[in-house]
Each structure stands twice: as structure tokens, then as C-alpha cells.
Image (tube, rainbow, N blue to C red):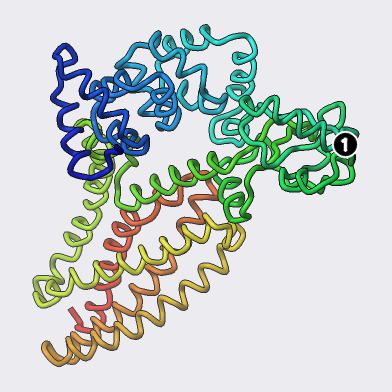
């Protein structure tokens, strides 16, 4: 009987965390785990610490533990290596695809990575080293180098037989690259097309033109395009157009998911977590936030300095201090909205680096219209309570602050991408600080001009 009730799973998870491997209850827990779905076991391991995760792996059958280890993300796999010992996970490591081995090796200390590599046979070492030879962040680093050898002269039957014999060693069989004798990519043929064709037809009659990526292409950009194109697999070639591997849907999905997690974290002035929240050590949570908080604290000094410069103005018109939170908050929010919109557009390739002038002009008009609406409202409300002069100051400031914030917020992500920085880094935290300081300067200059102080 399958165990899938949330309460049953919670109780089993609690018992596993409290469990001493030496007591008699071990066999009972092992038996219960046989009835838990793999996805629930994976969720248990991801929620708990490395010691308990390793304990769960030991209680599983060899077949199920290998599947679970394969599905875990590289950070959790590295935790399992540390908890179980690298000798205990040699079998798991050997069962991984070359690209997954490389992702795990990147998370391990060099000496542990070297020991695991030595345990591989010559062929596995060769294909793993092919992937290791490409730079991090490129398609070559995320591709599978194990692809079937199919030429135009082969018949459909020969290709199908080839796939059937080698299916266990291939990352995917749904999209089959076709090459010449020198591995130059000529086209692709889908598994569906093979099944629809006559067994004696040559591949040259059923193949079609291939979309492909270069091994040196940026992995995130390629993955986003790949997913938007609804592809299952994409041949990867070198600069001479020789086939070197295949880029699959699951790799593209993982790359985009990780990139989006990092962007979301940075929008909130934090670093992305490598593992689920509850299994992340407190020290790691602190580390992911402290750097940004220190940067923001130092940046906030700019705002304090601006207030210090205009201290005399505030003393002569104390009422101005009442509107500071409104003006800084409006400027920051306007800039953040623009930055988030443009960052998303960059990720989808709707906006390119050379579009900076178009984006600036568009966001300036958006900011101007937003400022006109908010400024009119501010003029009326502030004027009714504090007098017409104060209303004019608030209305004009909101107009200019919204225009400035939207323009800067729209342009900053493009500038960041142009210089090779992460656009998300230039979003909420930095734009808020910039708009706070600049907005206050605009505010006090308008106040001095209108109020004559």
C-alpha cells in the first residue's frame, strides 16, 4: 500500500530524523520507505540535513537510491558525498550522465572530485572530460556528449536498431542528429519520423534541417530560447560545425529555473539558496543576506548626507519632512517597476543592448504620465491641508521624481548587461538608494525655489 497521505509522510519523516540506525526499528522504516513514492523521498531529503538525507539513502534499495541520487540537485548530491563518503557513492557517480557528473564535481572539493574521477572507466572519464573542457556558463558545459552516430546513408531500420541497442547510454532518442563521416552536422530526424517511415528508406530522405547551438554559446540565453521554441533536444556543434553533443529539455529547464531563482533573490537584496530553506544552515542564510545589507547600509549614508546638506531648509519649513517618506517611496517603487519590467524583457530577448535609447525614451514618457497623475493628486491633497505653495512643491517633485526614476530604472538593467554584470543586481536595492538620494535633492531645490527659503 502506497504511503502518500501528508500526515503519514510527516510522521515517517519525523521518525527518520529521530531514528538511531542501531535500533530494531530499522527494518520497519526500511519497509515503509518501499511504499513511499520517489518524489516524496526526494522531497524528504531536500528538506532535511545531510546526515538524515544519507540515512534515507542507505535505507533504500540500490535501484531506488541510484534514481533518487540522480534526481537530486548538485548541491544536495555533494552533501550526500560528504555524509556517505565518496567511496559509498562511486556507483551513483558512475550512473550519472557526463553533464550531471560535471555539475556535481563543481560542488565538490578538488581532492574528492579527483578521487571520484579515478573510479570511472576510461570511456566515462573521456566523455566527462569533454564537458569539463568547456567554460562554466556555456552550452558545452551543460550538454550531453553521448549522441548516436547516424549518417544519411543509413536506413531507417539501421537507425532504429542502433537506438535500441544504445538507448541506456543516450541522454535522449527523440531528436537524432545526422552527420557525415567527419561528424559535421547535416540535419536531424525525429523518432516520430523514423517510426512513420519505411524501414528501408535512407535517412537522407527523412531528415530535415537542424536548429543547433554552439558549444561556446551562453547557456542561459540558449536555454530560454530553447524553451520558448518548444524543442525536445538541440544538437551542439563546435566552431567547425562538428557535432559535439546534445542539449536537452531537462538541462534547459534546470538552467532557467536556477537563473530565475537567483534573479528573484537579488531583487530582494539577497543571494539565491542552493538548497531548500529548511535544510539550509543558519550561517548560510546569514551569509546570503549580510553582504547586500552592508552595501545598502553604506549606500543609505548618501540619503543621510543629503538631509544634512539641506538641514537649514528643513528647519525653516518643518512641514517638508512630513512628505519625505512619500517622495522617496514613490521614486523607489517607480524605478523598481521599470527595472523589473526591462529585466524581464532582457531575459526574453524582447529588448537588446542597442535598444537603450528606445527604452529610455519609452520609460521617460511612462514616468512623466505617472508623475502627472500622482503629482496632480499630491498637489490637491497637500494644497488643501498645508497651503497652495506646499502643494506646488509636492506636485512638481512627484512629477520629476517619477520621470527620473522610471528612466533610470529602465536603463540600468541594459547598462548592467552591456558591461557584463547581472541586470538583477542593479534593480530594487540600488535603484531605491539612487532614487532616494536624487529625489531628495530635487525635492529640496524645488522647495527652496517655490517657498523662497
Figure quadrant of the N terminus? top left
Q: Residue at x 82, y 31 (%)?
A: 158
- Label 1 sits on a secondary structure element that is loop
Q: Quadrant of residue 75?
A: top left
Q: What residue occupies the far front of the structure in this picture?
A: 1
Q: Residue at x 35, y 58 (%)?
A: 431
Q: Residue at x 51, y 7 (%)?
A: 119
User: Mark 1 sits on what residue?
Assistant: 152
Q: Position of residue 243 (x, y in %)?
A: 75, 32
Residue nearest the observer in this picture, 331 or 17 = 17
Residue nearest the observer in this picture, 196 or 416 = 196
Q: Quadrant of residue 180?
A: top right
Q: Quadrant of residue 187?
A: top right
Residue nearest the observer in this picture, 423 or 449 = 423
301 lies left or right of 370:
left
Q: Position of residue 289 (x, y in %)?
A: 25, 41
Figure quadrant of the C terminus? bottom left
Can the viewer see residue 50?
no
Q: Residue at x 44, y 77 (%)?
A: 366
Q: Position of residue 298 (x, y in %)?
A: 24, 46
Q: Residues within 10 Å of mark 1 (few under 14, many from 20)?
A: some
Q: Position of residue 256 (x, y in %)?
A: 49, 46
141 lies left or right of 48:
right
Residue nearest the observer in this picture, 140 or 172 = 172
Amino acid at each position: 500500500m502506497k504511503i502518500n497521505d501528508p500526515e503519514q509522510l510527516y510522521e515517517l519523516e519525523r521518525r527518520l530524523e529521530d531514528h538511531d540506525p542501531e535500533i530494531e526499528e530499522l527494518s520497519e522504516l526500511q519497509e515503509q520507505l518501499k511504499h513511499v513514492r520517489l518524489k516524496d523521498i526526494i522531497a524528504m531529503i531536500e528538506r532535511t540535513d545531510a546526515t538524515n538525507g544519507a540515512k534515507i539513502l542507505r535505507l533504500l534499495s540500490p535501484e531506488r537510491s541510484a534514481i533518487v541520487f540522480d534526481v537530486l540537485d548538485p548541491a544536495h548530491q555533494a552533501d550526500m558525498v560528504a555524509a556517505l563518503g565518496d567511496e559509498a557513492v562511486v556507483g551513483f557517480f558512475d550512473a550519472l550522465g557526463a553533464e550531471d557528473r560535471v555539475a556535481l564535481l563543481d560542488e565538490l572539493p578538488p581532492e574528492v572530485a579527483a578521487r571520484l574521477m579515478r573510479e570511472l572507466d576510461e570511456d566515462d572519464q573521456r566523455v566527462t572530460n569533454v564537458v569539463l573542457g568547456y567554460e562554466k556558463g556555456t552550452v558545452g558545459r551543460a550538454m550531453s556528449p553521448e549522441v548516436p552516430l547516424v549518417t544519411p546513408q543509413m536506413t531507417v531500420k539501421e537507425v532504429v536498431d542502433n537506438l535500441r541497442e544504445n538507448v541506456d547510454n543516450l541522454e535522449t532518442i527523440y531528436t537524432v542528429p545526422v552527420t557525415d563521416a567527419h561528424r559535421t552536422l547535416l540535419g536531424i530526424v525525429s523518432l516520430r519520423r523514423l517510426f512513420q517511415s519505411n524501414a528501408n528508406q535512407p535517412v537522407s530522405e527523412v531528415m530535415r534541417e537542424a536548429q543547433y547551438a554552439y558549444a561556446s554559446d551562453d547557456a542561459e540565453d540558449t536555454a530560454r530560447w530553447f524553451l520558448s521554441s518548444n524543442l525536445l533536444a538541440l544538437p551542439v556543434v563546435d566552431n567547425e560545425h562538428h557535432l559535439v553533443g546534445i542539449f536537452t529539455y531537462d538541462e534547459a529547464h534546470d538552467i532557467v529555473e536556477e537563473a530565475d531563482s537567483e534573479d528573484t533573490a537579488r531583487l530582494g537584496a539577497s543571494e539565491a539558496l542552493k538548497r531548500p530553506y529548511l535544510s539550509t544552515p543558519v550561517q548560510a542564510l546569514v551569509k546570503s543576506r549580510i553582504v547586500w545589507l552592508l552595501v545598502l547600509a553604506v549606500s543609505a549614508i548618501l540619503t543621510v548626507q543629503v538631509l544634512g546638506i539641506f538641514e537649514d531648509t528643513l528647519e525653516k519649513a518643518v512641514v517638508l519632512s512630513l512628505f519625505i517618506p512619500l517622495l522617496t517611496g514613490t521614486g523607489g517603487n517607480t524605478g523598481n517597476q521599470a527595472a523589473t519590467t526591462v529585466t524581464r524583457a532582457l531575459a526574453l530577448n524582447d529588448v537588446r543592448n542597442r535598444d537603450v535609447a528606445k527604452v529610455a525614451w519609452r520609460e521617460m514618457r511612462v514616468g512623466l504620465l505617472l508623475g502627472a497623475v500622482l503629482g496632480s493628486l499630491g498637489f490637491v491633497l497637500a494644497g488643501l491641508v498645508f497651503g497652495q505653495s506646499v502643494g506646488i512643491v509636492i506636485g512638481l517633485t512627484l512629477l520629476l521624481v517619477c520621470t527620473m526614476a522610471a528612466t533610470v530604472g529602465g536603463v540600468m538593467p541594459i547598462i548592467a548587461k552591456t558591461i557584463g554584470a547581472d541586470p538583477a543586481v542593479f534593480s530594487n536595492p540600488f535603484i531605491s538608494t539612487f532614487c532616494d538620494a536624487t529625489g531628495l535633492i530635487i525635492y529640496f531645490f524645488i522647495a527652496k525655489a517655490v517657498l523662497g527659503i
